[in-house]
Amino acid sequence: MSWPSLADGFTAETLWRVGLAFAAGTVLGIERERRGRAAGLRTTLLLCLSACAVMLISDEYYRKSMAAAGAASWHPDPMRLAAGLLSGMGFLGAGVILHLRRDITRGVTTATTLWLATIVGLCFGAGAHGVGVLTTGLAWVALWCLPRLEIGIHRDQFGEVVVIYTASSMPLETLSARIESQGVSIKHLDWREEPERDMRRVRFDIKFKQIQMPALPRDLIGDLSRLPGVRLVHWRG
């Protein structure tokens, strides 16, 4: 079977689909570019266009093969290229995620936006204009509007406080109660004793509200430093 040329598939509908993918990639990419992310306008736009082109090619080959050979014979699966694109997208998404330390990871929203741009491009390439436009609109709301709403949400944050003090100066319960009096919750502690020096080192993993920053570290360090026998107080948030 000879494959028909795709030149006659370059129609007004094709231009419409590619144009919508271009617009959607631009809308999503500008938001990431404005926030200074590694995958910004160009990356998101190119990814959305690539997904659209992949779906257009898959759909065109499928229709042409059906017309040339009939519905009863073998024909290419129009979703194979799209599935391969989504699988490869995982590597690109993983490349923009940064694990700075155990409690801070950045780039997850950018990776998700790239994944979404791929899906939107596939939607437009397949001719599902309504789904693509609706998804792009809701994504715009999520990326541009929800951050303003998040400001009013008092999110939990986590940190750690390390205290080194003379073990005989006070029991651990007193130190724990003093920390919790600042409005934080102790989630876990690591306790190390040096009996020959009468020293104790305790690391507290704590949970607190974002609204308590940046005053909490200053108040907590100042309060703990005034306790008897305390040699060092270290905050890490």
Image (spheres, rainbow, N blue to C red):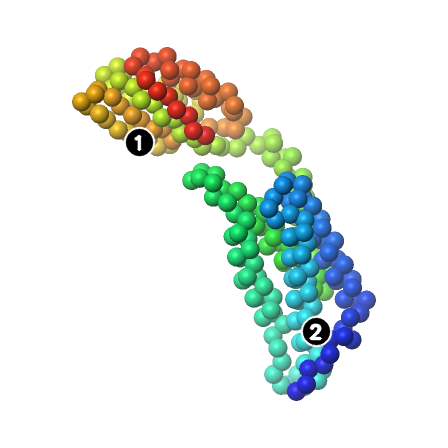
Q: Is residue 134 visible?
A: no
Please state the horizontal and vertical placement of residue 199, each as a whole percent of the image. 25, 21
Q: Is 80 positioned to the left or the right of 21 in the image? A: left
Please state the horizontal and vertical placement of residue 188, each as a whole percent of the image. 35, 32
Q: Is residue 119 above or below residue 167?
A: below
Quarter of image, res 236: top left
Which mark sits nearer the N-terminus, 1 or 2?
2
* Secondary structure at numbered mark 1: strand
User: What type is the residue that disc 2 sits on?
Assistant: Glu
Q: Are marks 1 and 2 in contact (CB under 8 Å)?
A: no
Q: Is 55 positioned to the left or the right of 112 in the image? A: right
Q: Quadrant of the C terminus?
A: top left
Answer few, some or many: residues within 10 Å of disc 2's Cα (few below 14, many 20 plus, some between 14 and 19): many
Q: Is residue 187 above or below residue 20?
A: above
Question: Residue 190 has which mark?
Answer: 1
Quarter of image, res 147: top right
User: What type is the residue that disc 1 sits on?
Assistant: Asp
Query: Residue, x 50% and y 45% (percent of image)?
Result: 98
Answer few, some or many: residues within 10 Å of disc 1's Cα (few below 14, many 20 plus, some between 14 and 19): few
Query: Residue, x 26% and y 18% (percent of image)?
Result: 166
Gap between marks 1 and 2, in whole Å? Answer: 62 Å
Q: Nearer the viewer, residue 126 or 219?
A: 219
Q: Nearer the viewer, residue 195 or 133?
A: 195
Query: Residue, x 63% and y 41% (percent of image)?
Result: 36
Please state the horizontal and vertical placement of residue 35, each as a whole percent of the image. 64, 40
Q: Is residue 32 visible?
A: yes
* Secondary structure at numbered mark 2: helix
Q: How many marks?
A: 2
Question: Residue 60 has which mark?
Answer: 2
